């Protein structure tokens, strides 16, 4: 058994007992109330979900198991996965063991390549990627063991098997989607000596002078791993998973949510917006020009992609990390310089609009420019990169939820007439 699974076997029963005790003592305590505006407003800010892998305080940004993001940006994605699951960073032996575990599971079933090959050539890369995840559902250990009558306390173990099998294969699948969709030549075989993200870089086949692109990808796959439980991809995935659908179903479902322009697709949209400004002004625009361009975007009824957030009320620390990388590695790149100028300008424009609660950049505001610099210029692929990383968090959340034995998700909905009755009754009291 892997060291990670062994550790989880000790940790999970303790956590489950702690939760059971808390529920026994405090189960009827009120933790939040819901206003009518929240019911009609996407349940923004309503506390009612549980996610132990990470949290996002509005004034701090992502914290993974107590570690503020800025303190762990140098970690490998595998270390982040270990942290998400156990609450601890792995020691050298545990890391090696996890890396070996992933390598051992990294063979992609041959039919996946045929399915990708059979898709229309102009399919969106996210459709290709998510279809590949879903088509592998026949491999699910959870589904098989469930059919055989597995006991409830073994659910997490079977989900762990699915999670590791999926995570191990994602780099090869994602790299093939890139090469196939953008006519980059034949599939590149895995480099079994490389780490998880290094292998991905190898299979993408893009130039990697001085290992710089590999450094960016390591950071990219670290930064996008998890963002608590209420974002569209994590929440939809958790809802699907709560019906005891296996991870192939739930992960691909969650990633379909990530493919929306208000969520993960914003990174594709954002670089498009930046390049549009450069085309309009024949090069890196001035801050005055950007100010006007952002105002025009708002006036045309569109959002400025990469800015604003449902939870955050500060500059996203993930954007800070990308900005620092850009300053260190490509300070003179005109696209990166435009991203910096947009950062100096757009928050001023958005702050003037009263309804916008967060005028600051989110994770998607800068990443595209960095990828573009290294020759990854096909924007529609960017959300696939995000997905490979976000799979770490979604899989970890799913394993933890199964281990804690959480029930099927089923909040209550009311028709508008029902809410009308409640609020009228309140007014009359
Ligand atoms: N540009 C223009 N208008 C914006 C805006 C932006 N960047 N951010 C918010 N608004 C608008 C909203 O569209 C909303 O308008 P309506 O009431 O007319 O619908 C209003 O301001 C209030 O929104 P909010 O309460 O501040 O923000 P929400 O929680 O409703 O939405 C979003 C959060 C991220 C969806 C929003 O800020 C947005 O659309 N941003 C641009 C798209 C983007 O960058 N998405 C990626 C977010 C990070 C992420 O999930 N990455 O995967």
Image (cartoon, grey):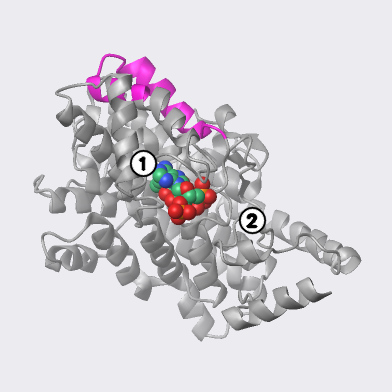
Mostly what secondary structure, the magenta segment? helix
Residue 428 position, x and y percent, is 80, 75
Q: Is residue 273 left or right of residue 363?
A: left
Work out how far the residue at label 1 is from the one at label 2, CA to CA, in angstroms.
29 Å
Magenta residues span 314-341
Which residue of the protein is positioned furthest toward the front in this rendering? 428
Q: Residues within 10 Å of mark 2 (few under 14, many from 20)?
A: some
Residue 240 position, x and y percent, is 50, 72
Secondary structure of the residue carrying tag 1 is loop
Which residue of the protein is positioned furthest toward the right in this rendering? 25
Residue at horizontal 22 percent and vertical 65 percent from the top:
110
Q: Is residue 397 visible?
A: yes
Residue at horizontal 35 percent and vertical 27 percent from the top:
342
Q: Which residue is mark 2?
A: 51
**CB at disc 1 and ligand 1 closer than 8 Å:** yes
Asked which quadrant contains residue 191, the reply is top left
Q: Which residue is mark 1?
A: 304
Q: Is residue 205 left or right of residue 75?
A: left
């Amino acid at each position: 058994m892997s060291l990670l699974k062994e550790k989880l076997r000790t940790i999970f029963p303790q956590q489950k007992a702690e939760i059971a005790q808390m529920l026994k003592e405090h189960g009827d305590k009120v933790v939040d109330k819901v206003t009518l505006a929240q019911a009609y407003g996407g349940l923004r800010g309503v506390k009612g979900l549980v996610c132990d892998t990470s949290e996002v305080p509005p004034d701090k940004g992502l914290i993974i198991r107590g570690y503020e993001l800025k303190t762990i940006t140098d970690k490998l994605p595998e270390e982040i996965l270990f942290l998400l699951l156990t609450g601890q960073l792995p020691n050298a032996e545990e890391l090696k063991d996890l890396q070996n575990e992933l390598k051992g599971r990294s063979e992609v079933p041959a039919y996946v390549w045929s399915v990708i090959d059979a898709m229309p050539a102009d399919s969106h890369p996210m459709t290709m990627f998510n279809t590949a995840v879903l088509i592998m559902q026949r491999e699910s250990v959870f589904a098989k063991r469930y059919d055989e009558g597995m006991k409830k306390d073994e659910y997490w173990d079977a989900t762990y098997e699915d999670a590791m099998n999926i995570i191990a294969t994602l780099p090869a699948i994602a790299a093939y989607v890139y090469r196939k969709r953008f006519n980059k030549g034949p599939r590149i075989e895995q480099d079994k000596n490389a780490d998880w993200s290094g292998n991905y870089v190898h299979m993408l086949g893009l130039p990697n002078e001085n290992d710089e692109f590999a450094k960016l990808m390591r950071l990219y796959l670290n930064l996008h791993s998890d963002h608590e439980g209420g974002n569209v991809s994590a929440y939809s995935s958790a809802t699907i998973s709560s019906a005891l659908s296996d991870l192939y179903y739930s992960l691909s479902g969650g990633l379909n949510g990530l493919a929306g322009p208000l969520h993960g697709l914003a990174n594709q949209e954002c670089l498009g917006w930046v390049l549009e400004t450069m085309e309009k002004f024949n090069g890196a625009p001035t801050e005055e020009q950007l100010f006007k361009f952002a105002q025009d975007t708002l006036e045309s009824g569109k959002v400025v992609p990469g800015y604003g957030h449902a939870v955050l009320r500060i500059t996203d620390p993930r954007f800070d990390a990308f900005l620092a990388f850009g300053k260190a590695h490509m300070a003179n790149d005109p696209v990166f310089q435009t991203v910096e100028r947009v950062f100096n300008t757009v928050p001023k424009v958005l702050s003037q609009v009263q309804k916008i609660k967060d005028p600051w950049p989110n994770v998607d505001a800068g990443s595209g420019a960095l990828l573009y610099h290294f020759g990854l210029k096909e924007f529609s692929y960017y959300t696939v990169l995000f997905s490979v990383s976000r799979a770490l968090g979604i899989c970890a959340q799913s394993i933890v939820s199964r281990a804690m034995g959480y029930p099927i998700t089923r909040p209550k909905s009311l028709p508008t007439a029902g809410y009308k009755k409640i609020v009228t009754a309140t007014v009359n009291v």
